[in-house]
Amino acid sequence: MKVILIGDSGHARVIADNVTSNGDTVIARLDDKYSELEKRGECFYGPSSSVHELIRQEQAKVVIAIGANAVRQKIASKLNLSEDNYATIIHKEAIVSPSAELGPGTVVMPGVIVNAAAKVGSHVILNTRLVIEHDCVIGDYAHVSPGAMITGGVLVGDGVHIGAGATVIPTKSIGAWSTIGAGSVVIDDIEEHSTAVGVPARIIKTADQTVSTANRKA
Ligand SMILES: CC(C)(COP(=O)(O)OP(=O)(O)OC[C@H]1O[C@@H](n2cnc3c(N)ncnc32)[C@H](O)[C@@H]1OP(=O)(O)O)[C@@H](O)C(=O)NCCC(=O)NCCS
């Protein structure tokens, strides 16, 4: 498979390693820091607007290789490609249950385990050595960071960022566009657009306010 990466930063370099681990090839790195499309060696570099032309010309698939969830969503909406235009990239050293589902544009890094009947949305980052247990649902544009442990039946909303090494206990829900701090342990449902940190995780920010230290709640 030929793959076009949108984005040309550190995260894109990690995704490029995932692509090549499977014997696939990165044929283009598109980023709006480039003003026009040019070929250097075997790879095209150019603005993201070149993507439509390259898909046609190279019959390549696309991955939005940008770490920030909201930016990934904005670019997907701007490009307006069909689901078929996106690749799902699974590193050869990841383990994904045959009964799990992964959406288009989603990237699964080395050492990840996705267990039975988990449903992972589109444009999700499942980062190095994390575990998604059975029956979890992970929303579109989420990023689960390295080493996180998402236990059975957890619902992770669209655009959620779960920090490195965080744990969510079974069947809890993390509302859309929330952030869970690195190393935190979530033992209660977390409302959307919140930031929760610590063991157990307490909400320190909601959509419209910062919760005072004296008044933090799970
Ligand atoms: C949760 C997080 C986003 C908060 O960032 P922030 O909004 O800038 O918050 P601040 O750094 O101002 O910290 C606010 C408070 O939360 C505490 N806090 C922040 N992160 C924490 C964490 N992970 N665990 C426990 N407490 C934490 C701070 O000590 C501070 O407490 P105080 O008000 O009593 O002083 C960030 O700290 C974090 O953990 N990010 C995850 C990073 C990560 O794993 N990236 C993976 C990339 S692959």
Image: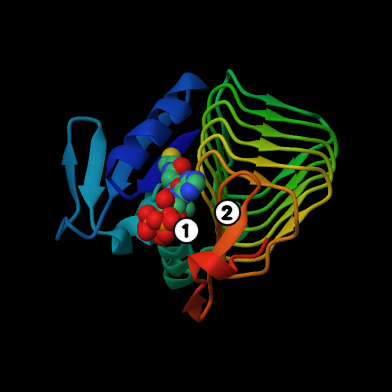
Cα distance between the residues tagged 1 and 2 = 6 Å
Amino acid at circle 2: Ala
Disc 2 residue lies near ligand 1 with CB under 8 A: no
Residue 84's spot in the image, x, y percent? 61, 53
Mark 2 sits on what residue? 142
Residue that appears at 25% across and 31% down: 42
Residue that appears at 29% across and 38% down: 10
Report the residue that reaches farthest toward the bottom: 208
Q: Which mark is residue 146?
A: none
Amino acid at circle 1: Asn
- Residues marked 1 and 2 touching at CB (< 8 Å): yes
* Neighbours of disc 1 within 10 Å: few (<14), some (14-19), many (20+): many
Q: Earlier in the sequence, mark 1 or mark 2?
A: 1
State the image quarter where residue 113 is shown: top right
User: Is residue 200 rendered to the left or right of residue 31?
Assistant: right
The mark tally for this picture is 2
* Neighbours of disc 2 within 10 Å: few (<14), some (14-19), many (20+): many
User: Is residue 1 rendered to the left or right of residue 103?
Assistant: left
Numbered disc 2: secondary structure: loop
Residue that appears at 58% across and 18% down: 93
Q: Where the C terminus falls, by quadrant?
A: bottom right
Residue 92's spot in the image, x, y percent? 57, 20
User: Is residue 140 rendered to the left or right of residue 62?
Assistant: right
User: Is residue 157 rendered to the left or right of residue 37?
Assistant: right
Mark 1 sits on what residue? 69
Disc 1 residue lies near ligand 1 with CB under 8 A: no
Residue 58 in view (yes/no): no
Residue 137 in view (yes/no): yes
